[in-house]
Each structure stands twice: as C-alpha cells, then as structure tokens.
C-alpha cells in the first residue's frame, strides 16, 4: 500500500487533475507517451486509497488481455496484494463475468463454452461436411467474416435462444444457420455473442442491469478510441446510475477502425455528455524532441483528427535516420550492423531494441540478417519466420524429396490429410525398424502390403517419386510451386483463408526467386536446404531475455523501447495496399496513424528502413513509402543511396495510384449495368467510402463488389419508345453488338415489343454501317484489352490481397503471379490477364468479325 500523497507525486498538472477528478463524466485526450497508462493506474489506486472504495466496485476496461495484466500488476504495486482486481479486464472478460452470473435469465446454462477462432473453424469443418461444401465455395475466413457481420445485429439471437428455424437457398446463409444450430446444441458462444448476449440480457431484464449499474461505482476505459459502438453502448448503460465514467484515449492512435473501432466516441464525448470535463495531456515523457517532431509532423497530414501538438522537455538526442538499401538483403544487414554498433559503442543491451513492421512476412529478411550476425532475438507475439508451420511444411516437402529423411516424412505424409493416421505411421515405423531403413523407403518398398496400400499413401509416393526424378530439371522456385499445388498444400492453406500464412509462403517463394535471379545460376537444392537449416536451428545462443524484439506495429501499441527500427517502410506495405483498396481515404489515415504509433514507441533513437527490388508476388517494383515523401528533409538524415531516378519513379507510381483512388462513382443504385465477364447486372448498393458498387448479376445470381475504376462496367440504358426508323437502326447495331451488350434479359424484363423487326438480309448500305461499327469496335477492343490488363494488374496490389479473395480467384491469381513466365519478364509489367478472362474477351470480340 502506498500513501495518498505518494500517489500524487511526480504528476504534472493535467495528470494530477485526471487522477483526482473522480466524480462525473471525464474525458482525457492524451497523446503518445504522455502518461495515460500512468494516470489510469494511479487514478485507480487513488479511488481505492483516497476514497476507500472497494476495488470490486471499480470497472477498468482495457483493450487487450496483455494490457489488463500489465495494469493489474502496476495497480497491485500501489494498492497491495489483497485487493480483488478482477474487474480490471477486457470488454470480453467483463461480459464473461456478467454471463456467469446472469445467463440463466435467458434460460442458458452457466457452463457455457467460449469458442475461439480455432473452435469456430472446427464447427465450420463439420458444417462443410454436412453440406458437402468445399473451400472452393467459401474460405473459412469469408464465412467467419459473414458470421461476424450477421451478428452486428441481434436478429440472430432468436435462432439460438428460441430455436427458431429458418429455410434458405443462400449457401452462406445455410452455413450460418447450421453454425448457430451447433452453437445452441453445445452451449457455445463465440466472441461476438459474449457482448450481444450481455446487451440482450441488460435490455430485457431491468433488474439485472440495475444490479450491475449499482455495483460499479466507478468505470474507467482505456484506449477508448479503439472501442466499438456496441462496446461503448455497454459502458454507457453501466454508467447511468452512478455517472462516474472516465474515458482516456488518443484519436491519433486509432488503429482498429478496420475492425469496428469508432474513434468518434471519444472525439464527440463532450457532445454526448454535456456536463463532462475534458483534460488534454500533451507533454510527452518518452521520446526525444527529434522523434516527437517527426511524429507530430506526420500525423498532422491526417484530416480527421483533434488537433494537438505534443511537446517534450527531454534532451535533444540523436537525429532520426532513414536507410535506403539497394535490396532487402542490404536493408537487413544494415539493421543488424547498426544494432551491433550500438551494443558495442553505446553499451546498450539487445533488449533495448525493437524492430517493427506492418506485415508479418517482413520479418523474414530481418531474421535472416540477425541470425547471420548472431544477434539474439525473439518474435514478440508471434513465431519466428522459419519456424512458422507453413514454412516448415513447404521446406519439409523439399527435404523429403532431396534427403528422404524421417523428420520430413513425419511432417508431411499426412499434411494435408491423406487419411494416414497414427496407426498407419506405426505400421510403417515397424517395417522401417525391421528393415533398418528410413520411413519413406519402408513405405515405398512395401506399398503393396495390405495395410499400407492406401490410396493416400500411393498418391504420396507417386508425388515424391515424380519430383525426385524431375527436380534436376526445375529451378527451386518452380519446384516449390509445383509441389505446393500437387501435394494439395496450396489448397490446404487457402481453406482457412489465413492471409498471413499465404503471405509467408509467398515471401519464401519470393526470397528463392530473388536468390535465383541474383546469381543467374540455378541453386543447388542441397545447398539451399543446408543454408536454410541454419535459420531453422533452434539452438541459438540463449542470453536469457536479452534479445532484440521483433513485432508488428499493432503488437507494439502501448509499449516503449529505447531504440526502434521501422523496417519494410515500403509503398504497398506501409501504407498497406490492401487496406487502401478496401477502405480508401479512411485506410490511408489509419495507416498514417500506424506510422505514428511506430514512431512514438521510440525513446532515444528512431530508424526507418526500406529497400529497392522487385516483388515477384505483386509483379511490381518496390518503392519507398509515400509517407516518407511526406516528411520534410530536415526531420531526418539519410543513409544509403536513394537515387533521384527511384524518387521520380516512386512519385510517378504514386500519382498513378492516387488518381485511381479518387475516381468518382458513375452509377447509382438501381442502374442496370453490363460487366465484361458477368454480363447484365443491377447496382444494388453504392459504397462511396470503399469506392465500389455491389452488383447483383442476373445470370449467376451472385452479388459482387466492383471497383469504381473498373472500366469493364458500362451502363445499360433503359430502352425508350423508338420510332420505326430508330428501331431499324437499333436492330442493326444490336446485331453487331450482340455478343457484348447481351441485353436480352433486360429487354425481356422490360418492353418486349420494342425490337420486333426481323434482322434483314445484309444490303451494301448495311455492310457500310457494319464496317463503321467494326472500326469502332477495334478501338473498343484495344480499350478492353487495356482494361483486362489493368484489372488483373490492380488485383496484384499486394500479396495479402490475393488471399482475401475467393478461393478460385486466389488460385488463378497465384498461378498467374507465381508462374515462371509471369516473373521471367522482370519489367514491372509482367502481370498477364487471366486466361479465362482473355478467352472470354477474345471470343466476344472474334464473334464480331465473323
Ligand atoms: N509525470 C511524469 N514524470 C516522469 N515520467 C513520466 C510521467 N508521466 C509519464 N511518464 C513516463 O512516460 C512514459 C510514457 O508513459 P505511459 O506509458 O503512461 O504513456 P502512454 O500515454 O500510455 O503512452 P502511449 O499511449 O504512447 O502508449 C513512461 O515511461 C512513464 O513512466
């Protein structure tokens, strides 16, 4: 326990006000490193110590479990061991507490199960089996997103709580209904349910909400900018009795808008609670002025924000550094050398360093450099690149083909599943022992034996034997691609639609291609595997916890480190091309906030690094992030040579991308449109924010999101009454144009009488007309070719984007981008139109000439 005066010590004026203003509605808008966590913790202790309130009457909501643990630890130091700190928790944690106590109000048992994502996937596996579905129709990720979307409304609760039945023809809806049935049968709640159930109980049981309102005298919310509408609704309900609500946050650090965070809640708090008090904390205690000015400078470019400039009284410190490498190897090496230099010269420890990146796969190049330079590191909140399951699986196939070893055999013989379970492996092992041979040889030599000659085993042997024979004729990157496809590994990873896994595999392929193209000599598979084995070796020197920490920017939220490297500061990575494509201007601001979060983690020094090169997955050259060009030169020093040519190209590329982004909508809801591939459709929704239409296609019956900029979408005007002359003209032109504007459906649906004239025999006059039309069409053809090229190129914006799409599309995209022919022409324009699209297009166009 600590004295009250002690709790007020070392606080600045605003912090002190935040700590001691315990009554009423209070909002603290506090910038990075301004002591939010400190204020929140001390305030909690102050309520306990100075006001004598029992901790079981204080709810303190944090954004993550990690933050809750950290806060409990700090509060414990202030108020002693004996307090009940279980109400320092996350939204979900609090909901579980309510449900344990009150779920019986909705006639559900108290021993309900909480499903995490893996459990959800297990349920989906069962549902897929029952419905005979495959991942070709929907990936798990797509279904999980759909389920979550359905659960934004509470309508679904009646299917769980009242066992209401529902019939539907819609496939994804069928999956959803079965999923709900299984939830009900097992009393299992997913994370969305936790909050929905609590809200439902509160709304329908005034006695229950009243009990909770009276119990929670004080409520504190951390990271309020990342709360969702529903989460805040819960808090608002709870605070209505005692009216002591303290919210703290920084709108500039909102990085979960893509997941439903509503920073407006914090921004408009004073409007919602008119008697509320606002405290602004803008003194930063963490960083040097150089680092802080860079953060201030970059975040100012955001339009949607509360204007506040952070200041610090900390000493000047060193300059911020930007390093530009000629390739990613150089980037990784420079980072490793800089760490070594600082450890030697400045007497730092490895744990003083954090290496941050926007996307997980960026860790590969950094990890390789750290391992080569013998620098201990750990991947915080993640797994080292070469220890990730998907990477180990791919490498195990290669190793089995090359070495035939038992480890690799055991890893892949039933991955993906071939129905070869433990019993089968035991049988193989017995034979291997008896014959003193490897597991693979034992299986191969005895495949005709009754208990071994399974279909899956035969196919597996056939596959490995095939590649043992042809491996010498293939470069490793092709071998990886073919093995992944034929073994079913590609499909296996696509089922879950796990973006990270697919990105990691592509990163591995990319790194192999880079090796191959650098040397222009095929690499020997044995040598490659031996080299890679060095990176997978677990026996790195163990220095206890003195390790460099690698993590994503999202994971770094709320943490601080003396030295921070932001690596992979490349356009398309940060800002993420996928996010921008999905959420446009909003995403760009969120990406800028991510950059701000990364910068403001640093205490003494901040580095931004990126490198040139060609990304074989996206088919595009790598350029520095657009954010780097937003920073004036006086905010950093540059190391490494960044040529004017690269700067110009990067800016040119950016202009091109930006002009694409600001394309305005051309169609409105209700417009009939014709799509290059899916033909006639109706615009049922216009999503301005995302720059896309939702178009329901008549032939396929499916609804697809189509980008504003897609040029293969044309409006089909509603036919008007025509004069006799016009009818003749129209009939001629329709005849020419029939294969493109197939508007029969539209005509059928509207005025069937309009085109009644039979098509006449071709006169000279008509031939002239057709010739003219053909001339027009040639122009159109060139235009369409360009469209297909551009649309397939725009699909290549990022690796991860590909995994966001439907399985078939993913497969096509992967084949396209990873096929040797696609990357051989190393010119940045190597993306080719999909064969299927091309054929469709050609047949349409050819039809017009015949
Ligand atoms: N009044 C103060 N005097 C000295 N140091 C302080 C003071 N307030 C905060 N600090 C220190 O500043 C650093 C940042 O504080 P804290 O982590 O609480 O900030 P934060 O606002 O939660 O940061 P962020 O939102 O960026 O994660 C910590 O090292 C903390 O100990």
Image (cartoon, grey):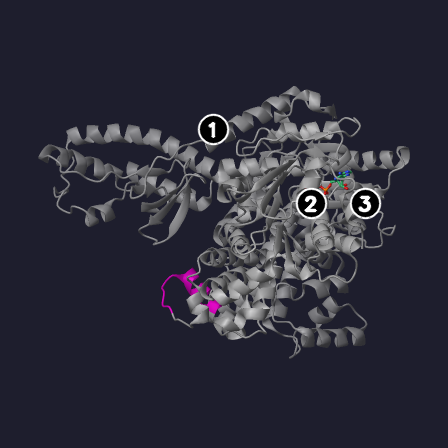
User: How much space separates mark 3 and mark 2, taking CA atoms?
Assistant: 46 Å
- Give the magenta-colored segment's residue range: 166-180
66 or 550: nearer the eye? Answer: 66
Q: Quadrant of residue 26?
A: top right
130 or 830: nearer the eye? Answer: 130
Mark 3 is surrounded, within 10 Å at the Cα level, by few (under 14), some (14 to 19) or many (20 or more) other residues, namely some
Q: Quadrant of residue 80?
A: bottom right
Q: Are marks 1 and 3 in contact (CB under 8 Å)?
A: no
Residue 151 is a magenta residue: no
Can you tell me whether the CB of the residue at mark 2 lies under 8 Å from the nearest atom of ligand 1?
A: no
Q: Quadrant of the C terminus?
A: top left
Q: Which mark is residue 659?
A: 1
Q: Are marks 2 and 1 in contact (CB under 8 Å)?
A: no
Quick one: which residue is furthest to the bottom in this view? 450
**Residue at x-position 47% and y-position 63%:** 200
Q: Which mark is residue 371?
A: 3
Q: Is residue 516 visible?
A: no
Upstream in sequence: badge 1 or badge 3: 3
Residue 179 is a magenta residue: yes
Q: Which mark is residue 774?
A: none
- Mainly helix, strand or loop, the magenta region? helix
Look at the numbered disc 2 and give the secondary structure of its residue: helix
Q: Quadrant of residue 575?
A: top right
> Where's residue 430, x and y in %?
76, 77
505 or 599: nearer the eye? Answer: 599
Q: Quadrant of the N terminus?
A: bottom right
Q: Quadrant of ligand 1?
A: top right
Look at the numbered disc 1 and give the secondary structure of its residue: helix
Which residue bears the numbered disc 2? 19
Q: Is residue 486 visible?
A: yes
81 or 799: nearer the eye? Answer: 81
């Amino acid at each position: 326990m600590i004295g009250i005066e002690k709790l007020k010590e070392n606080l600045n004026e605003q912090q002190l006000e935040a700590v001691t203003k315990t009554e009423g509605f209070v909002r603290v808008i506090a910038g990075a490193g301004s002591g939010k966590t400190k204020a929140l913790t001390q305030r909690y202790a102050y309520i306990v110590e100075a006001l004598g309130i029992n901790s079981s009457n204080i709810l303190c909501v944090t954004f993550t479990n990690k933050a809750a643990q950290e806060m409990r630890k700090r509060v414990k130091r202030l108020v002693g061991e004996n307090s009940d700190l279980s109400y320092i928790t996350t939204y979900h944690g609090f909901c579980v507490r309510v449900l344990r106590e009150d779920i019986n109000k909705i006639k559900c048992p108290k021993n309900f199960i909480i499903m995490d994502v893996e459990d959800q996937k297990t349920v989906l596996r069962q549902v897929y089996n029952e419905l005979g579905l495959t991942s070709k129709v929907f990936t798990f990720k797509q279904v999980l997103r759909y389920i979550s979307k359905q659960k934004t409304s509470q309508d679904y609760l009646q299917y769980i709580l009242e066992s209401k039945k529902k019939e539907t023809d819609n496939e994804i809806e069928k999956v959803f209904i079965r999923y709900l049935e299984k939830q009900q049968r097992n009393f299992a709640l997913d994370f969305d349910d936790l909050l929905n159930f609590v809200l439902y109980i509160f709304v329908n049981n005034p006695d229950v909400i009243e009990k909770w309102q009276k119990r929670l005298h004080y409520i504190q919310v951390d990271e309020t900018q990342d709360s969702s509408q529903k989460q805040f609704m819960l808090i608002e309900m709870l605070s209505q009795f005692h009216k002591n609500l303290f919210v703290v946050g920084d709108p500039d650090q909102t990085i979960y808008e893509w997941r439903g965070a509503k920073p407006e809640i914090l921004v408009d708090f004073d409007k919602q609670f008119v008697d509320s008090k606002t405290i602004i904390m803008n003194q930063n205690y963490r960083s040097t002025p150089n680092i802080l000015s860079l953060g201030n400078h970059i975040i100012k470019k955001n339009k949607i924000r509360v204007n506040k400039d952070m200041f610090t009284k900390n000493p000047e410190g060193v300059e911020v550094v930007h390093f530009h490498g000629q390739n990613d190897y150089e980037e990784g090496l420079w980072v490793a050398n800089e760490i070594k230099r600082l450890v030697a010269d400045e007497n730092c420890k490895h744990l003083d360093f954090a290496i941050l990146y926007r996307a997980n796969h960026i860790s590969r190049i950094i990890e390789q450099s750290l391992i080569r330079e013998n620098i201990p590191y750990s991947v915080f909140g993640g797994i080292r690149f070469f220890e990730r399951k998907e990477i180990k699986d791919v490498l195990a196939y290669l190793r089995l083909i090359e070495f035939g070893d038992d480890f690799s055999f055991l890893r892949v013989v039933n991955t993906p599943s071939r129905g070869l379970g433990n019993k089968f492996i035991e049988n193989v092992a017995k034979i291997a022992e008896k014959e003193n041979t490897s597991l693979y040889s034992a299986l191969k030599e005895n495949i005709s034996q009754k208990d071994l000659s399974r279909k899956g085993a035969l196919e597996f042997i056939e596959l490995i034997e095939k590649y043992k024979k042809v491996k010498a004729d293939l470069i490793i990157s092709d071998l990886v691609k073919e093995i992944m496809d034929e073994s079913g590994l590609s499909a296996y990873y696509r089922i879950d639609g796990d973006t990270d896994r697919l990105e990691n595999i592509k990163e591995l392929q990319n790194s192999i291609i880079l090796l191959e193209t650098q040397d222009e000599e095929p690499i020997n598979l044995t040598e490659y595997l031996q080299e890679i084995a060095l990176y997978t070796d677990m026996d790195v020197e163990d220095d206890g916890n003195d390790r460099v920490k690698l993590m994503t920017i999202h994971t770094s939220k709320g943490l601080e480190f003396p030295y921070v490297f932001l690596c992979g500061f490349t356009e398309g990575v940060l800002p993420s091309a996928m996010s921008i494509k999905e959420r446009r201007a909003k995403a760009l601001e969120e990406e800028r906030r991510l950059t701000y979060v990364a910068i403001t983690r640093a205490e003494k020094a901040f580095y931004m690094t990126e490198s040139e090169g060609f990304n074989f997955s996206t088919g595009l050259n790598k350029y520095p992030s657009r954010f780097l060009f937003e920073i004036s030169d006086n905010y950093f020093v540059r190391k490494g040579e960044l040529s004017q040519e690269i700067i110009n190209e990067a800016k040119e590329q950016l202009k091109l991308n930006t002009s694409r982004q600001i394309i305005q909508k051309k169609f409105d809801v209700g417009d009939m449109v014709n799509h290059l591939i899916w033909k006639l459709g109706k615009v049922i929704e216009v999503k301005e924010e995302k720059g896309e239409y939702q178009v329901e296609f008549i032939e396929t019956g499916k609804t697809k999101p189509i980008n504003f900029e897609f040029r293969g979408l044309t409006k089909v005007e509603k036919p008007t009454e025509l004069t006799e002359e016009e009818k003749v003209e129209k009939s001629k032109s329709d005849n020419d144009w029939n294969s493109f504007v197939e508007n029969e459906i539209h005509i059928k649906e509207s005025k069937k009488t309009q085109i009644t004239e039979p098509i006449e025999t071709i006169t000279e006059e008509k031939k002239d007309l057709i010739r003219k039309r053909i001339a027009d069409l040639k122009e159109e053809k060139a235009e369409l070719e360009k469209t297909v090229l551009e649309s397939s190129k725009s699909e290549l914006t990022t690796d991860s984007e590909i995994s966001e799409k439907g399985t078939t599309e993913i497969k096509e995209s992967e084949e396209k981008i990873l096929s040797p022919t696609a990357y051989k022409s190393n010119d940045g324009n190597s993306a080719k139109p999909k064969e299927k699209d091309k054929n469709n297009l050609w047949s349409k166009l050819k039809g017009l000439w015949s």
